Amino acid sequence: MHNYKRTVDPTLEPVTLDEVKTHCAVSGDEHDGYLAKLIARATETIEKLVGRQIMPATWTLTMGCFPSEILLGRPPVSAVTSIAYYDAMGVLRTLAANQYQTDMSTQDGPARIKPAYGLVWPSTQSDTYNAVVVTFTAGYASAALVPHALKHAVAFLVAHWFASREPAAESPLSSIPNGLAMLLSLEDWGGYG
């Protein structure tokens, strides 16, 4: 089983407060605090819906053992920080970076990791949960690099929540604006991995 956990949250948002205020046709600073919270919540929602990390954050992926190839969801992945594992004797070890190779060339799918040429993954302790821990950084380096569809989706969802502050009586998915699904389909990579 593969488990993802965000261990360091982003420090920036993909859209600014001014951009959202323009989108929502809000002037003045009376609603700034509320809009800032909505930006953060909308960004998290969009990330979960499309299986991406928008702004830089640190993640861990834990697995019971090494698969033939490790797929890192939450694209785009910019760095693999470490690969730690419990060896056959139960000792926690960290693989040297020259023991594996990475492919982070795509922003539309998972990054890939496999053993370096001529090597195999080390043995892990077979009865240990989370015997392998991969730590990686994911997200676009700056807001300027975030696809416009994702930025627009965040602003769109903030505007929807700002205008509709009451819970919907219908199912949660039907309370999401129709245009949002279309925007997200432009950046949804399928979420496998």
Image (cartoon, rainbow, N blue to C red):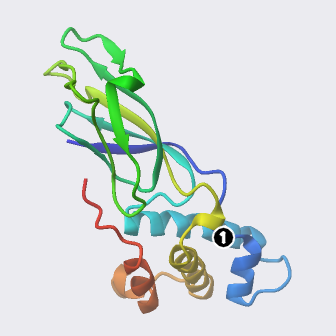
174 left or right of 65 in image: right
Most extreme residue toward the front is 117
Q: Quick one: 167 or 108, which is closer to the camera?
A: 108
In this view, the residue in front, 182 or 164, is 182
Q: Is residue 166 above or below residue 34?
A: below
Left or right side of 90 for 60: right
Q: In which quadrant is the N terminus drawn?
A: top left
Q: Is residue 189 above or below residue 100?
A: below
Tell me the residue that label 1 is attached to. Answer: 15
Q: Amino acid at mark 1?
A: Val
- Would you identify the image quadrant in which residue 64 lies? top left
Residue 169 visible? The answer is: no
User: Residue 47 at x, y = what percent?
Assistant: 45, 64
Give the farthest residue toward the left.
Answer: 126
| Residue 71: % across, % down | 28, 47
- Residue at point 19% right, 30% down? 65
Residue at image position (36%, 71%) is 188
Is residue 157 at all visible to an observer of this figure? Answer: yes
Image point 38% across, 64% down: which residue? 108
Above or below residue 135? Residue 165 is: below
Percent of width and height locating residue 60: 40, 39
Residue 142's place in the image compared with 188, above or below, is above
Q: Could you classify mark 1 by the number of other residues whose Cα lies within 10 Å: few (under 14), some (14-19), or many (20 or more)?
A: many
Look at 66% across and 70% down and name the residue there: 15
Q: In x, y percent, where is residue 5?
A: 40, 43
Image quadrant where residue 34 sits = bottom right
In the image, is 164 to the left or to the right of 121? Answer: right
* The one of 104 and 178 positioned closer to us in this rendering: 104
How many numbered markers are drawn?
1
80 sits to left or right of 57:
left
What SS does tag 1 mark? loop
